[in-house]
Image (cartoon, rainbow, N blue to C red):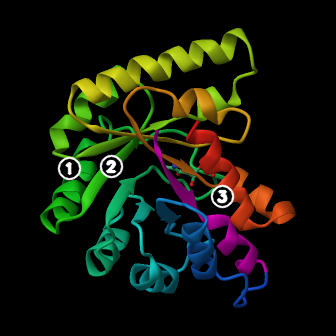
Amino acid sequence: MPLLGVNIDHVATLRQARRGREPDPVHAAVVAESAGADGITVHLREDRRHIQDRDVQVLRQMVATRLNLEMSVSPEIRDFALRVVPDQVTLVPERREEITTEGGLDVITHQQRVAECCSALLDAGILVSLFIDPDETQIRRSLDFGVQAVELHTGAYADAAPGRVREEQLRRLQTAAELTCSLGLILNLGHGLDYRNVQPVAALPGAHELNIGHSIISRAVFVGLDQAVREMKALIST
Ligand code: PXP
C-alpha cells in the first residue's frame, strides 16, 4: 500500500486571503502527521501566492515524517532549497497565471535547466523527483538526470468522466507505472486525486507515495483535518 503525502498549500492559501497568521500550515502539518500522513508536501511558488519561505523553514524543523518541497527549476528557489535541505524536492513546471500545476514538467524541452537544478540538489544529498506526464519518453529521459524518483501526473485520469475514458487513462497510468518501476525509479503519483477516484491509483503495483492536497483540505473544512486525513489513509490502505 502506498504512503500518503499530504499537500497543505491550501491552508496557506486561506491564511494569505487576509495576509495574517492563521490558519498556520505548520499547525496543519502537525495534525496531518498525527492522523497518519507519511509525509508533508508544500509548493513554494515563485510568486509566493500561498506557502512562504518562513513556512518551509519552520516545517523543516517541525516535520517528523518527510518534507517534500515542490518547486520550479528557478535558480532563486533552487538556492532556497539548498539552504533549507528538505528530505525531497519534486520539480514541477510553473506558470504565474495558472490556478494549479497544469501539466507535467517537460524534461526534454527544458533539459538543460532541469539537469542543472537536479545536479545541484542531488549533490546536496536531497532526494529528487520529477513531476511528469505518464508518457514513455518523459519517463525514459528522466533517467538521464540521475534522479531517484518520478511523480506521475494523475490529472488526466482524475479529470476523465467515470467509465471508458477514465479506464483508458488508468491503463495509461498502469503502463507508465510499470515502466517507471522497471527502470528502477521510485514511483510517486498525484494531482486531482480524491476520495472517489483514489483507490484504483493506490492499487497500481509499485506505487510508493500519493501526494494529495485539494480534496483532503476541502473535506477538512467540514469534518476536520484529522478525520479527512484518516479517511484518505484508510482508502489507500485497503
Ligand atoms: N503533486 C504535485 C506535483 C502537485 O503540484 C500537486 C498540486 O500542488 C499535487 C500533487 C496535489 O494535487 P491536488 O491538490 O490536486 O491533490
In this view, the residue in front, 121 or 171, is 171
Return the residue at label 3.
229
Identify the mark at residue 71; answer none if there is no mark. Answer: none
Q: Position of residue 106 (x, y in %)?
A: 38, 38
Visible residue check, residue 73: no
Which of labels 3 and 2 is toward the front?
3
Kind of residue sitting beneath label 1: Ala
Q: Could you tell me which residue is drawn at 59 percent across and 12 percent down?
A: 168
Kind of element beneath mark 3: helix
Whether 102 is drawn above or below 119: the answer is above
Q: Which residues are magenta?
A: 1-17
Q: Could you tell me which residue is drawn at 23 percent across and 46 percent down?
A: 148
Kind of element beneath mark 2: strand
Q: Position of residue 17 (x, y in %)?
A: 77, 77
Which of labels 1 and 3 is toward the front?
3
Q: Could you tell me which residue is drawn at 28 percent across and 81 percent down?
A: 83
Return the residue at label 1.
115
Magenta stretch encompasses residue 12 = yes
Q: 10 Å neighbourhood of mark 2: few (<14), some, or many (≥20)?
A: many
Kind of element beneath mark 1: helix
Kind of residue sitting beneath label 2: Ser
Left or right, residue 69 beside residue 202: left
Left or right, residue 164 beside residue 200: right
CA gap, disc 3 to disc 2? 23 Å
Return the residue at label 2.
129
Residue 69 found in image quarter: bottom left
- Mark 1 or mark 2: whose residue is earlier in sequence: 1
Whether 107 is drawn above or below 42: the answer is above
CA gap, disc 1 to disc 2? 12 Å
